[in-house]
Image (tube, rainbow, N blue to C red):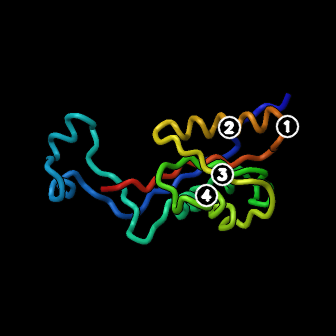
């Protein structure tokens, strides 16, 4: 039986930063209230023109580089997201195209907070069943207020 393992990781955070004070200007909240309950002081927010796929592509490029493989080596892209770029086609296919992946499959897993856990399990099953050798699993979100 084939075994899955993580060979590379990548990340990307949007440049725009929103503080709790910024948030309190548009919502009924305060820095103290948020920090006391969550510990969060700032968050990265996607720019107006940034899509979920843009964040996913940037993180994927870093992960592929870290793993020492090319997009052409991939058999599958599994993207965990709740806000896709569009309902159809899947955001994963936009990532697949942007990376230059010319074979294999790509699909989204939309399970909100647990999506990445499901995506990892889906990838593991594809590998264990010898249906894929190289799977790119991505978690990308553009939720903002």
State the mark number for residue 90.
Answer: 4
Q: Quadrant of the N terminus?
A: top right
C-alpha span from label 1 to label 4 = 24 Å
- Estimate how packed mark 4 is, as few (under 14), some (14 to 19) or many (20 or more) residues with alpha carbons within 10 Å: some
State the mark number for residue 107.
Answer: 3
Q: Position of residue 32 (x, y in %)?
A: 15, 41
Mark 4 vs mark 2, foreground winner is 4
C-alpha span from label 4 to label 2 = 16 Å
Q: Quadrant of the C terminus?
A: bottom left
Q: Which residue is mark 2?
A: 122
C-alpha span from label 2 to label 3 = 11 Å
Q: Residue at x 61, y 50 (%)?
A: 108
Proximity of marks 4 and 3: CB atoms separated by less than 8 Å: yes
Question: Tag 2's secondary structure?
Answer: helix
The mark that comes first in sequence, 1 or 3, is 3
Q: Position of residue 56 (x, y in %)?
A: 56, 57
State the mark number for residue 130.
Answer: 1
C-alpha span from label 1 to label 3 = 18 Å
State the mark number for residue 25.
Answer: none
The mark that comes first in sequence, 4 or 3, is 4
Residue sitting nearer the eye, 72 or 112: 112
Residue sitting nearer the eye, 143 or 69: 143
Residue 140 appears in the picture as rendered: yes
Q: Residue at x 79, y 51 (%)?
A: 75
- Estimate how packed mark 2 is, as few (under 14), some (14 to 19) or many (20 or more) residues with alpha carbons within 10 Å: some
Q: Is residue 108 above or below residue 131?
A: below
Q: Residue at x 53, y 64 (%)?
A: 54
């Amino acid at each position: 039986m084939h075994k899955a393992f993580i060979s590379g990781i990548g990340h990307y955070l949007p440049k725009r930063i929103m503080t709790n004070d910024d948030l309190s200007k548009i919502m009924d909240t305060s820095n103290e209230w948020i920090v006391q309950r969550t510990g969060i002081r700032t968050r990265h927010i996607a720019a107006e023109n940034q899509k979920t796929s843009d964040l996913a592509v940037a993180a994927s490029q870093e992960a592929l580089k870290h793993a020492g493989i090319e997009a052409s080596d991939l058999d599958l892209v599994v993207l965990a997201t709740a806000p896709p770029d569009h309902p159809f086609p899947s955001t994963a296919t936009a990532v697949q195209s942007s990376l230059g992946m010319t074979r294999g499959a790509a699909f989204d897993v939309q399970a909100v907070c647990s999506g990445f856990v499901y995506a990892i399990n889906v990838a593991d099953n594809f590998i264990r069943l010898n249906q894929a050798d190289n799977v790119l699993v991505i978690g990308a979100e553009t939720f903002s207020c």
